[in-house]
Image (tube, helix red, strand yellow):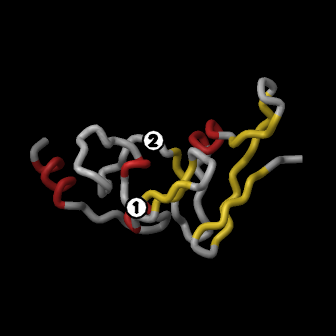
Amino acid sequence: MEQIKRYAFEGEVIEVPLLWDEDTQTYVEDYKSVIENPIYSPSGRPVLLTIEDACPYTDLADDDPASIDCGSCRHYHQFPGSLLGVCRNEQRRSGVKPKRTKARAKKEDTT
């Protein structure tokens, strides 16, 4: 029987697969599974690891240039006690055609 952990997020339930860890003798979140087979909230929002590289649509929570991951973005909502969270950026939502941001447009125009 597959084990899952459920998180409530903005009225939705997000299911994250678990796997048995021999070292700790407990079920832990299966991050490899989430990376290889991305999961989405019922409304199409991506579930991401906090430490994933920031995307081109990042809106950093601070001005620190070292902030280069999802966890540093204003759109990212991390689940309590987890390294996973949901991206609330509409441009990352499944089924939404991304718009070019000014920073992204400049970068693309200069290459």
Is residue 74 placed above or below 72 in the rendered structure? below
Q: Which residue lies furthest to the right in this view?
A: 1
What is the CA distance from the residue labelled 2 to the residue labelled 1? 14 Å
Q: 109 and 103: which one is in front?
A: 103
Is residue 42 positioned above or below 83 on the image?
below
* Outermost residue toward the top in this view: 23
Q: Where is residue 56 in the image (x, y as percent from the top left)?
A: 30, 51
Q: What residue is drawn where x is 66% and y is 66%? A: 8
Residue 40 spot, x, y in % from top left? 58, 59
Instruction: From the image, tell me which residue sits under label 1.
Output: 75
Q: Measured from the top left, where is residue 75 in percent x and y?
A: 40, 61
Q: In this view, does 6 lie to the left or right of 51?
A: right
Amino acid at dot 1: His
Q: Left or right? Give the position of 29 relative to 22.
A: left
Tell which circle, 2 or 1, labels the residue nearer the N-terminal end: 2
| Mark 1, secondary structure of its residue | loop
Q: Tags 2 and 1 in contact by the CB under 8 Å rule? A: no
Q: Residue at x 23, y 41 (%)?
A: 65
| Residue at image location 83% in from the left, 31% down from the top | 25
Instruction: Compare residues 39 and 5 and report the one nearer the observer.
Output: 5
Label 2 SS = loop
| Residue projecting furthest to the bottom | 11
Q: Which residue is drawn at 40% across and 68% down?
A: 90
Q: Nearer the viewer, residue 80 or 60?
A: 80
Q: Name the residue under label 2.
A: 52
Quadrant the C terminus occupies: top left
> Residue 35's image quarter?
top right
At label 2, the amino acid type is Glu
